[in-house]
Amino acid sequence: MNDIAHNLAQVRDKISAAALRCGRASEDVALLAVSKTKPASAVAEAIDAGQRAFGENYVQEGVDKIRHFQAQGITGLQWHFIGPLQSNKSRLVAEHFDWCHTVDRLRIASRLSDQRPAEMPPLNILIQINISDEESKSGIPLAELDALAAQVAELPGVCLRGLMAIPAPVSNYERQFAVARQMAVAFDALKLRYPTVDTLSLGMSDDMEAAIAAGSTLVRIGTAIFGARDYTKN
């Protein structure tokens, strides 16, 4: 077993254990392998180990990987864009990715909808919430969610699937859980209004257990799978 396969197995075990501790089924929590800055060869190792969903932060890097595996005839992969999205890059996301986690304004959602190719299924959209009110983070306040969700739900080229957040880092489990529960309450309310909503993208390596206990359905894990990143290439 190579390092990435071994790491994936360990991460999956941790997800299962965290789910079981709070009375949830392990299959209720999906794993998104964050492959940003990592070469296609590393992604290929993860694919060989059974991973199918990958998260990319940089549009062109993600598109290059998507095209690489399409050219190899590898199907069944899911590509999630999880980085800040600028308007001039929206077309590439709309034409290549399956998901976009970082919608925080109607203009971006509308561009993604208009630019989604007609022969592709609607682009799955998560609305990003700035749950910790950090000036450095993208996302909308929870108070603005209802209005934006109603607008996004009307767009034909996208499908509203849920919420995403990147809480401010804290080491205390109780504080992690309290913030995660805020997200989970908003998510549960959104599910009642929109039948397509089923995804709460919440939790990374340091707060995964609290996020799962609170109700996350998708955790985003990168370094624990692929190792430390080299940002000098971007």
Image: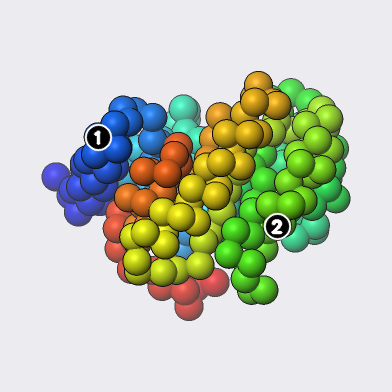
Residue that protrudes farthest toward the left in the picture: 1
Residue 218 vs residue 150, the one in the foreground: 150
Q: Which residue is mark 1?
A: 20
Q: Which residue is mark 2?
A: 141
Q: Which mark is residue 187?
A: none
Mark pair 1, 2: CA separation: 31 Å
Residue 209: image x %, image y %?
32, 50
Using the image, determine if residue 180 lies above or below residue 117. below
Q: Is residue 162 left or right of residue 46?
A: right
Identify the amino acid type marked 2: Pro
Using the image, determine if residue 124 lies above or below residue 128. above
Name the residue: 25% across, 34% down: 20
Residue 146 vs residue 60, the one in the foreground: 146
Residue 33: image x %, image y %?
40, 48
Q: Is residue 204 left or right of residue 134?
A: left
Question: Secondary structure under badge 1?
Answer: helix
Residue 132 vs residue 102, the one in the foreground: 132
The answer to whether any part of residue 220 appears in the image is: no
